[in-house]
């Protein structure tokens, strides 16, 4: 066997993790689903001017999906997958912690919702990566409800006493 045959054989072997169309489709659907769902949440956050926007949420979701997808495709046990998921959860906590800013007084923290959103986006990515796309979609819809609907409900519950009229309303 010549040197070039050995090199080409090694290169072919290195790119053989996607063996057939079924596997390529499965992996593509899971990663694109993670990217799409992360992008939806990131778009909402970006529209509100938050620090973590569309690109951050997409990368978190894709990364989380890839961290569980590759070991699953390699055939690891459930116990080993549990450790992988624990690592993703812990690791994403550090990223979320970076989004939290302590204000001048000890009672004022900023960025908690952003940190929680990043954490949830990672969980959605894990769900998509494990082939639980329906669960990932449902969770994304629930997260959107929290981001979009809950502020309105809270404003209604607080009432006019806690919401002074704007200058234009006098």
Image: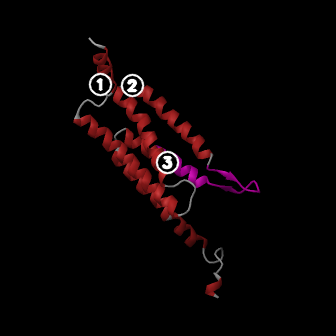
- Residue 118's spot in the image, x, y percent? 52, 48
- Residue 12's spot in the image, x, y percent? 29, 25
Q: Name the secondary structure under disc 3.
A: helix
Q: Quadrant of the N terminus?
A: top left
Tell me which residue sits at (47%, 34%) in the image.
Answer: 85
Q: Name the secondary structure under disc 1.
A: helix
Q: How many marks?
A: 3
- In three-dimensional space, the C-alpha distance between marks 1 and 3, rounded to whole angstroms, equals 38 Å
Q: Which residue is mark 2?
A: 77
Q: Is residue 168 above or below residue 103?
A: below
Check residue 12 in the rendering and tell me which mark sits there, or answer none.
1
Q: Is residue 22 left or right of residue 118?
A: left
Check residue 120 in the rendering and tell me which mark sits there, or answer none.
3
Q: Which residues are magenta?
A: 99-122
Labels 2 and 3: the sequence-earlier one:
2
Q: Name the secondary structure under disc 2.
A: loop
């Amino acid at each position: 066997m010549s040197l070039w045959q050995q090199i080409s054989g090694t290169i072919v072997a290195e790119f053989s993790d996607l063996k057939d169309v079924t596997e390529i489709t499965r992996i593509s659907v899971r990663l694109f689903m993670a990217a799409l769902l992360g992008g939806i949440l990131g778009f909402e956050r970006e529209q509100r001017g938050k620090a973590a926007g569309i690109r951050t949420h997409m990368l978190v979701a894709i990364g989380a999906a890839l961290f569980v997808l590759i070991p699953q495709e390699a055939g690891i046990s459930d116990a080993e997958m549990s450790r992988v998921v624990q690592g993703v959860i812990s690791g994403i906590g550090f990223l979320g912690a970076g989004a939290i800013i302590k204000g001048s007084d000890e009672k004022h923290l900023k960025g908690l919702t952003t940190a929680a959103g990043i954490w949830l986006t990672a969980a959605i990515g894990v769900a998509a990566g494990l082939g639980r796309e329906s669960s990932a979609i449902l969770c994304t819809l629930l997260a959107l409800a929290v981001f979009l609907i809950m502020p309105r409900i809270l404003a209604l519950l607080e009432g006019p006493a806690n919401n002074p009229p704007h200058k234009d309303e006098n």
